[in-house]
Image (tube, rainbow, N blue to C red):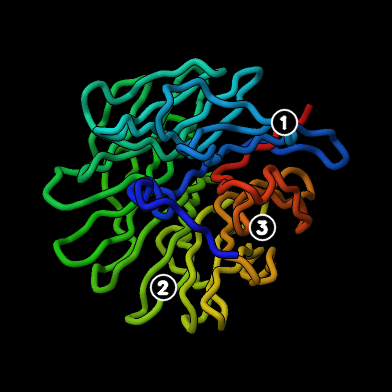
Amino acid sequence: MKRIIPISLMVMLIMVLTLTGCGGGSGKGKKGTAVDVYVAGYEYNGTCFVAKYWKNGLVEVLPEEPNNSRANSIYVLGNDVYVAGYEYNETRFVAKYWKNGQVVDLCGTCSGYASSIFVSGNDVYVAGYDLYKAKYWKNGQVETLTNGKHKASASSIYVSGNDVYVAGYENNGTKNVAQYWKNNQKVPLTNGEQDAGARSIYVLGNDVYVAGYENNGTKDVAQYWKNGQKVPLTNGKHDARATSIYVSGNDVYVAGYECNEEDINVAKYWKNGREVPLTNGKHDARATSIYVSGNDVYVAGFDGNVAVYWKNGQAVPLTDDTKWAGATSIFVVAR
């Protein structure tokens, strides 16, 4: 069943389909250890979209005014749950995050979106953008990554030691260039000849992994880059995008989706380049976030109208099929 969205919410839909929320994390559960599974997302309540998250399948609605809102990324540290997202207040989008349900407005009077959150010690980092500038906030203080001459976006943030990595894209006047910034210094991943985007970043030791896509002239190819070297995941026959990346030891896990012959997106992930389909292609579906805990692989996304996560390929629905919903980010914590 294809998703049917009221025309009045089309602007919100555009943001739903273009944003990627990935809350990067380095915590891994041990084999056999009980875990708590946190998933951020949204659900349509008949009037507007509502930002929320689920802990072990139980929903927590994030307090907000009665406007469209969305949770894009989740990060858990100790007893604290951080969720990044935004609200549309009928005139503009407002970037914000919630700490244990308490809202922190990042925008003031600006228009902006929060797409990814990472917590390091006492510091809270949030990546996002306004209509033209990629940026991130550290403890509420904004760092602007682009000059606003061309449209740009920051989709994912990761902190390693004293280094801040942000993945996204910047338009060169004609095409979107996939890139990341390390401590505000731009590192291009594509040459700007075809549209491309970086959607998720993960750092392990001296290695920088970035998931995204690049158009081959006719189709988008799902891929990731390791230290700037491209690793294609699909053959370019059908449109596909990589949305999230997680590295565990020597294994590289990438979530995403690919169109099938019927032009329906199939949610899937790749482990070391080997494809693992998660849905059967009957409904539009996407995998938006991936997390590895011990030997278990967790992937968040949606299948049809249902927000869902998959554990080792087995679906765990978070909503029913009566309302439009989606899961954007997953984080797993050992108890």
Which amino acid type is shown beneath numbered disc 2? Asp
160 left or right, relative to 172: right
Q: Left or right of 286: which side holds 335?
A: right
Distance, label 1 to label 3, CA atoms, is 31 Å
Q: At x 26% / y 68%, what residue is drawn?
A: 191
The answer to whether residue 34 is left or right of residue 111 is right
Work out whether mark 3 precedes mark 2 in sequence or the reverse, and give the earlier one: 2
Residue type marked 3: Asp
Q: Residue at x 38, y 46 (%)?
A: 9
Q: Please indicate, yes or no, whether residue 105 appears anywhere in the rendered image.
A: yes
Nearest the eye: 280 or 221: 280
Separation of residues labelled 3 and 2 (CA atoms): 24 Å
Judged by depth in the image, the label closer to the viewer, 2 or 1, is 1
Kindly identify the amino acid type of the residue bearing the numbered disc 1.
Leu
> What secondary structure is marked by label 2?
strand
Q: Earlier in the sequence, mark 1 or mark 3?
A: 1
When asked about the image quadrant of residue 221, the answer is bottom left
Label 3: which residue?
251
What is the secondary structure assignment of the residue under circle 1?
Answer: strand
Residue under numbered circle 1: 58
- The local crowd at label 2, few if under 14, some if 14 to 19, many if 20 or more residues have their Cα within 10 Å, is many
Q: Position of residue 259 (x, y in %)?
A: 53, 74
- Place of residue 53 in the rendered image (x, y in percent of width and height, measured from the top left): 60, 32
Q: Which residue lies under the disc numbered 2?
A: 220
Furthest-right residue in this view: 32
Closer mark to the observer between disc 3 and disc 2: 2
